[in-house]
Every structure is written in C-alpha cells, then in structure tokens.
C-alpha cells in the first residue's frame, strides 16, 4: 500500500468506508453535571456496536445550564441504529431504564427534525394515570410522578435519516503505551467536534472486525490483517515495527461531521509525532463496495 | 407600507360588531369596499366608513385610533397579522382567534379571548368576567394561544379552558380556572375565592395566593418543579417578572377532588 509521510508518521493512502444510519439525539439534565453525566453514561452503556447491541450511542458533549431547556446542567446523547424501528425501541428502553430511573433527571429532544420519534409519549404510561401533559408553545412535555418528584420528558425527539456510522481511524504504533497515547489524544480531539460520538470504551476499539467468519452464524470476526500477533501470516497488513493497533470508530449526524471528526483525530495523532505516539495511520474499508461514504486519509491531512 | 388605520369619528350610538375588520377579511380590499362593510348590531345600518375615518395601508397591520366599550368582537376569528386598539373594547375581543396578535391598549369587556384557538392577545388594562371562557352552548373554552392581561381579570377567568396559557399580571376574580379541562392559568396578583372550582385537569398558578381555597383541594407539599422552569422559559418573553417568580419552589394542591382531581394549583410555599 502506498503511503505518505507526515511529521515522521506513515499515512496509508486508503479510506474509511461508512454507512448510512438512522440517528437521534436527546438532552438529559439533572441537579448537577455529575448526575446528568451518570444518566447519560448509563443509557449509553452496552451500545458500542449495532452488531450486538442494537444501537451505537455516546455522549456528544456536556451542556452548560444556559444550553438546556430547564436551566440545569446536562448532557447531549446521540443514538444510532440501522433502522427507525430499532432506534425507537432502543431509545424507549434505554431512556426508560436508565434516565427515568436516575435521580433528578429530565429528558428533552436534542435534534430538531420534521420526522419524530416517541420519547415521553412512550414513557408516560409509567405514570399509571397520574402523568400530566403540558404544552408550552409548540413543545409538549410529559410530567411523570416519581419518588423524588417528577420525571419531565419531552413528548418526542427528532429523527435523522442522513446520519453516518462507521467512520474510522486505525492507529498503529511501536508499543501499547505509545499507541494508546496517540489514540487517546485523537479521541480527545474528536470530542471537541459537535454531532459525533466514538461509541467504543473510552472511544477506542482494540478488536476491529471484518465482515463474516469461517463459522456459520457469526456475522463479524476479528480483523486478522491487523492483529499484531498474526504478523507474518499471509494476510497481515502490518509492518515489522508495529506491535499494537487500536481503532477509533466514529458515528455522526452528518457526513461532514464524521469528516471533521476524522480530520481532528488524524491531526492530533500527527501532532504528537512518532516518538511518543503512532508510527502509522490507516483506515478500514470493504473495498468501497458496501458503504456510500468514503473518507480518504489524504484529504484529511493538515 | 404603513398600517391600515381606523380613526374613530365619534362615540358610536350602538354596539358594533367589529369581527369583519380583521386582516383575513380586509387584505386586498379597496378603501371604498372597506368603508362599505356593515358593523351594526341593531336595525339601524352602520358602515365602517360612518364610524371610522379610514387611512388605507397594509391590511395585515391594522390600527384603531380610539376605542369604545361598544367595540364588540374585535379581532374575532383572526388567523394572521396584527390588530392594535388604542382604547377600550367591549365583549368577546379575540373570540375564536386562531393566530396573529391582538393588542388592546385599554380595558376589555367580558369573554375576551373566548374559546380562542391560537395567536396572542395582550390586554394592557383590565378585562371583564369569563376571560377565555366559552359562550352559552359551548362545552370548551380556550383551546390554544396565549393571553396576557396586564391589569385585573373578572370572575371565572379561564373557565373550561382546555389548552394554551393565560397570564394575569393583576388580580383575578373568584372561581379563576373554574371547570378547567387542561392548560395553564397564571395569576400574579391575589386570586379571589375558590380558584380551580371543579377543575378536572390543568394548572393554575396563584403567585399571591387566593382569598379561599376549596377544601376539595389537597396539599401535596412544597417542591421545586422542573416543569415550572420550562414554564418560566416560555413565560419569559411575555412577562419577565412572572417568569422569575415561577423559578422558585411552590406548594402544590391537587384537585378538584370533587371531580377527578387531576388538576393542580400552585400556591406560595407559606399558604395565605
């Protein structure tokens, strides 16, 4: 594979291949930022990949009190799924089990769009007849009595059909420590880009996958071409100096947001340099035949 | 383009029905056609040109220079544009209003905003009884929109209200929010006797308490309501002082238990 050298780091002349997804956003507020974050972290748990979790979800960013509908600290959460029905199901279950239950929480729509998903309209029945609907202007809310007061929840939130899932950066380094340092820095940089999430633990996946398997019924399996302990095997894509590989997967509400996030991540890795960080940057694709969104690394360079 | 102006010639000799003088009806009409619109409510014919000196202008921006307590049904049924009246008006101002803005710089008579569906009605002075309520034969009062009364409101403000918001910055008479079905009624000043009488659902906020609360309302304690912060954000554009007060803890009474008891009245934390 041809490569460019930028700041001493090898950049593969390849591209990340991503797919269209359904997405939504919600805003969670609470008495303080810690409890808003707690509710958001809880509802985005076990949401790393649509392969096994039903959806991919994460915190877009924390919100100041002046940015939320009720003037309390909050968190904006993004959810991505492969179908509208699955997204609705995941949203309802996760908000119902993880946000409604969290002390002092309230939940609002975080995405303005014509198409709507049920939020409070689905959860209001927990009120067992004591729930109250309030409409202020064009916004409708449900007030559901709970033991510490009321769970206030917007009736609906917006649905996006133009979201993108599967933007990615593959970070390759000489040691586990330097590779992790570069990847962490990239995740931090991506965290400043609005409308994107990195759904894996801490934003990082160590088990990149390929489509299919030699075993019947297994839809995804290890990306053996990038497994460092399989170097030397016929299929390996790794150089001799690479001993650790990590991947950042990026989902965004728009293709531009995913491109901006990848650009921020790649630049952060390049800025750190090869001594303290990565030796090589790559990206995962399926030959360009499966996903309509292609992000070429050479287009993302400084 | 400047506003379409109706200047009152003399105090009218009979009650007038001003419902035809809305942007919906006047857009595209010439001065002579507007002047020919009949406004009488008795057998004595009275045309707009007889009552008003008309200065033609943008019919989506209508201004009345001078008012009268005999100006009935002003802005009734309007769905767009703006009407402002520099003076008092009579009964049923903004009745069945669907949209737009009606501003009365004076007092309004009874049944202002009667069964209103949308838009904004601002009354700078006082208003009579049954603000936003239904007229005889109707089962539902206000169904949407926002009403702001800077002065006082008469008895039974918000009667049978179903949706929308009423803000009374002065006092309200007895039975405020009587028979409410839903919606929100906020009274900044003192509320008369028995607010929420037979209300089934909906929200009444009595920021200065009431003269008497029915024993069919039950005290559910003082709380900080997240929903009131949302209400305050919405009210901010209409009445900043009321909005600031809403952001405090309030005592909630549930009722009216004489009916289904799913309504609520917010009182100051220390009941008075």
Image (spheres, rainbow, N blue to C red):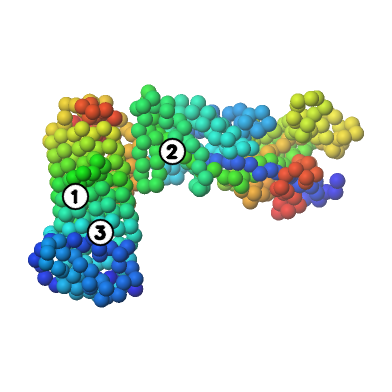
A283 and A32: which one is in front? Answer: A283
* Whether residue A243 is situated above or below residue B80 in the rendered picture: above
Q: Residue drawn at (14%, 72%), measured in percent from left and top?
A: B9
Image side of residue B108 versus residue A44, left or right: left
Q: Which part of the image, by quadrant, shows the C terminus of chain B? A: top left
**Left or right, A175 with reference to B146:** right
Label 2 environment density (alpha carbons within 10 Å; few <14, some 14–19, many ≥20): many
> Which residue was labeled with disc 2?
A155
Q: Which residue is mark 1?
A: B111
The residue tagged with tag 2: helix, strand or loop? loop
Residue B132 position (above or below residue A121): below
- Check disc 1: other Cα within 10 Å, few if <14, some if 14-19, many if 20+: many
The location of residue A174, given as percent across then percent down, is: 79, 36
Task: Tell me where residue B269 sits by quadrant.
Answer: top left
Report x, y in % for residue B148. Answer: 25, 51
Which subunit holds the residue at mark 3? B
Spatial CA distance of label 3 from label 2 is 32 Å
Q: Return the chain for callout 1.
A: B
Percent across and percent down for residue A208 are: 74, 33
In whole angstroms, how far apart are the C-alphas of marks 1 and 2?
Answer: 32 Å
The verdict on a common chain for dots 3 and 2 is no
Depth check: give the residue in front, B67 or A190: B67
Question: Which residue is located at x 60 percent, y 41 percent?
Answer: A22
| Crowding at mark 3 (Cα within 10 Å: few <14, some 14-19, many 20+) | many
N-terminal label among 3 and 1: 3
Are discs 3 and 1 both within one chain?
Answer: yes
Q: Which residue is mark 3?
A: B75
In this rendering, which labeled residue sits more in front, label 1 or label 2?
1
Mark 3 or 2: in front is 3
Q: Is residue B91 left or right of residue A56?
A: left
């Amino acid at each position: 594979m041809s490569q460019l050298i930028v700041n001493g780091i090898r950049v593969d002349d390849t591209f990340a291949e991503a797919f269209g997804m359904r997405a939504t956003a919600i805003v969670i507020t609470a008495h303080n930022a810690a409890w808003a974050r707690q509710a958001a972290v809880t509802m985005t748990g076990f949401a790393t990949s649509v392969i096994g979790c039903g959806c991919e979800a994460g915190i877009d960013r924390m919100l100041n009190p002046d940015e939320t509908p009720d003037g309390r600290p909050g968190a904006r959460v993004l959810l991505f799924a492969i179908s509208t029905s699955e997204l609705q199901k995941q949203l309802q279950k996760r908000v119902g089990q993880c946000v409604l239950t969290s002390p002092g929480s309230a939940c609002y729509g975080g995405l303005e769009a014509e198409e709507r998903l049920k939020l409070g309209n689905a959860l209001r029945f927990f009120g067992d007849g004591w729930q109250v609907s309030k409409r202020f202007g064009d916004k409708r809310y449900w007030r559901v009595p709970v033991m510490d007061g009321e769970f206030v929840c917007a009736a609906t939130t917006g649905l996006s059909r133009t979201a993108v899932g599967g933007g990615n950066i593959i970070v390759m380094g000489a040691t586990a420590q330097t590779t992790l340092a570069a990847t962490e820095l990239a995740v931090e940089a991506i965290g400043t880009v609005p409308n994107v999430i990195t759904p894996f633990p801490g934003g990082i996946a160590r088990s990149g996958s390929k489509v299919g398997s030699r075993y019947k019924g297994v839809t995804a399996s290890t990306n053996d071409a990038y497994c460092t302990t399989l170097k030397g095997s016929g299929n390996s894509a790794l150089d001799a100096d690479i001993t650790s590989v990590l991947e950042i997967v990026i989902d965004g509400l728009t293709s531009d947001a995913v491109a901006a996030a990848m650009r921020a991540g790649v630049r952060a890795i390049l800025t750190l340099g090869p001594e303290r960080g990565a030796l090589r940057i790559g990206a995962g694709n399926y030959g360009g035949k499966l996903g309509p969104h292609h992000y070429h690394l050479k287009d993302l360079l400084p | 383009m400047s506003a379409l102006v109706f200047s009152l010639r003399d105090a009218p000799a009979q009650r007038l029905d001003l419902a035809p003088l809305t942007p919906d009806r006047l857009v595209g009409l010439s001065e002579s056609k507007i002047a020919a619109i009949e406004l009488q409510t008795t057998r004595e014919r009275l045309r707009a040109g007889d009552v008003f000196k008309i200065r033609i202008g943008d019919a989506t921006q209508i201004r009345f220079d001078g008012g009268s307590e005999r100006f009935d049904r002003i802005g009734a049924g309007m769905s767009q544009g703006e009407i402002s009246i520099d003076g008092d008006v009579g009964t049923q101002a903004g009745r069945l209003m669907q949209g737009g803005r009606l501003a009365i710089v004076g007092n309004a008579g009874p049944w202002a905003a009667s069964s209103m569906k949308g838009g904004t009605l601002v009354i700078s002075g006082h208003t009579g009884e049954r603000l936003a309520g239904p007229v005889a034969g109707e089962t539902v009062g206000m169904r949407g929109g926002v009403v702001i009364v800077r002065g006082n409101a008469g008895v039974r403000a918000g009667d049978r209200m179903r949706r929308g918001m009423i803000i009374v910055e002065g006092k309200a008479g007895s039975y405020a929010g009587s028979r409410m079905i839903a919606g929100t009624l906020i009274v900044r000043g003192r509320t008369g006797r028995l607010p929420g009488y037979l209300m089934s659902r909906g929200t009444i906020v009595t920021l200065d308490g009431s003269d008497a609360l029915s024993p069919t309302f039950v005290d559910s304690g003082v709380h900080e309501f997240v929903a009131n912060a949302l209400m305050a954000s919405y009210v901010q554009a209409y009445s900043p002082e009321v909005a600031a007060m809403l952001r405090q803890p309030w005592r909630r009474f549930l009722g009216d238990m004489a009916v289904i008891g799913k309504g609520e009245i917010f009182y100051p934390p220390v009941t008075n």
